[in-house]
Image (cartoon, helix red, strand yellow):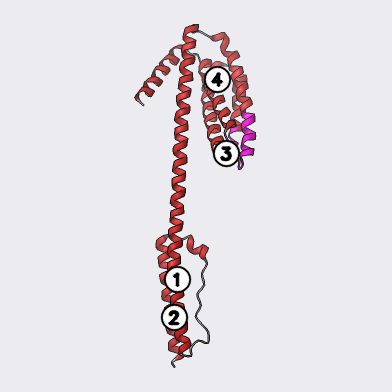
Amino acid sequence: MKHFYLFLFLITSLISKAQTPCDNANYYLVSAYSHVKSSYDANNISHLKYFANRSVESLKLSKKNLSSCGCEMALELANKAIDLLLKVDAAETYEDGRFFVKQGRELSKQSVIEIDKCAAPNKTVNASNTQTLSDLEKEQLKLQQQQEALKLKEAQLKARMAEEKDKTLELEKEQLMLSYKNAIATNLKTYNETLNMCNCANTPLEYTENPATVTSKTIEDIKKYYLLNLEMLATKYTQVLRLCGK
């Protein structure tokens, strides 16, 4: 990681001394185009949206230099690409998102072509420095993409862990509910048999519930819910038995 930051520092120093606003804008536009291509090549909506957002970030950074560069056409294309790619995040299906990404990709590509036209007359660095910067930029972009891939994997892992945690909690709830239901069923059977034996079973005791409502509760609330129902059932049984004896 220390080497990575040192590498970024060297790149920043070189760029600040050798590059014009057009060169800086060109770097961000190329980066945006790389991201939107990755988005278009993605095989699922999660990756498609992720790289589309990364492309938008680079396009926005390019605008800071495009105004100084005076490349109005590239700026206009970048704005249009941003407008389209911002719609990707709200897309509900992979196909809908890819539709906007495809258009954004073409606009991003055209913006790179236009900035090259604007930057060409203003080159102030020699061929050797230009090649050095190009190689450094490629290496930086490669490192950025690697970091982004790691961040994406980390996010996916956290999502899977959260999903597994939710499944474990749901299973725990189901097991707890089943235990209480068995207890209620046992008590209900005993109560009704006793009432029947005492000739008090004109209206047998019953118990009903809405499982969906119970499942939505927390573990502690589920325990309180069933304990309350057990208490209410016992109270009703006692009342029926007492009335029958009068």
Of residues 238 and 171, the one nearer the viewer is 171
Of residues 104 and 34, the one nearer the viewer is 34
Which marked residue is nearer to the observer: mark 4 or mark 2?
A: 2
The reply to whether discs 1 and 2 touch (Cβ–Cβ < 8 Å) is: no
The disc labelled 1 sits on which kind of residue? Asn
Count residues near mark 4 (Cα–Cα under 10 Å), then give few for <14, some for 14-19, many for 20+: many
List x then y, in percent, for residue 166.
Answer: 45, 52
Residue under pointer 3 = 45
Q: CA distance from mark 3 to mark 4?
A: 31 Å
Q: Main secondary structure of the magenta part?
A: helix
Q: CA distance from mark 2 to mark 3?
A: 56 Å
Residue under pointer 4 = 66
Q: Secondary structure at mark 2?
A: helix
List x then y, in percent, for residue 160.
Answer: 46, 45
> Reading the chain from its start, which is encountered first: label 2 or label 3?
3
Residue for point 53% across, 17% down: 68
Q: Secondary structure at mark 3?
A: helix
The disc labelled 3 sits on which kind of residue? Ile
Q: CA distance from mark 4 to mark 2?
A: 83 Å
Residue under pointer 1 = 182
Residue under pointer 2 = 190
Residue for point 53% across, 24% down: 31
> Reading the chain from its start, which is encountered first: label 3 or label 4?
3
Residues drawn in magenta: 85-104
The disc labelled 2 sits on which kind of residue? Thr
Q: Secondary structure at mark 4?
A: helix
Which marked residue is nearer to the observer: mark 2 or mark 3?
A: 2
Q: Relative to 155, does residue 200 appear above or below in the rendering?
A: below
List x then y, in percent, for residue 85.
Answer: 59, 32
Q: CA distance from mark 1 to mark 3?
A: 44 Å
The disc labelled 4 sits on which kind of residue? Leu
Which marked residue is nearer to the observer: mark 1 or mark 3?
A: 1
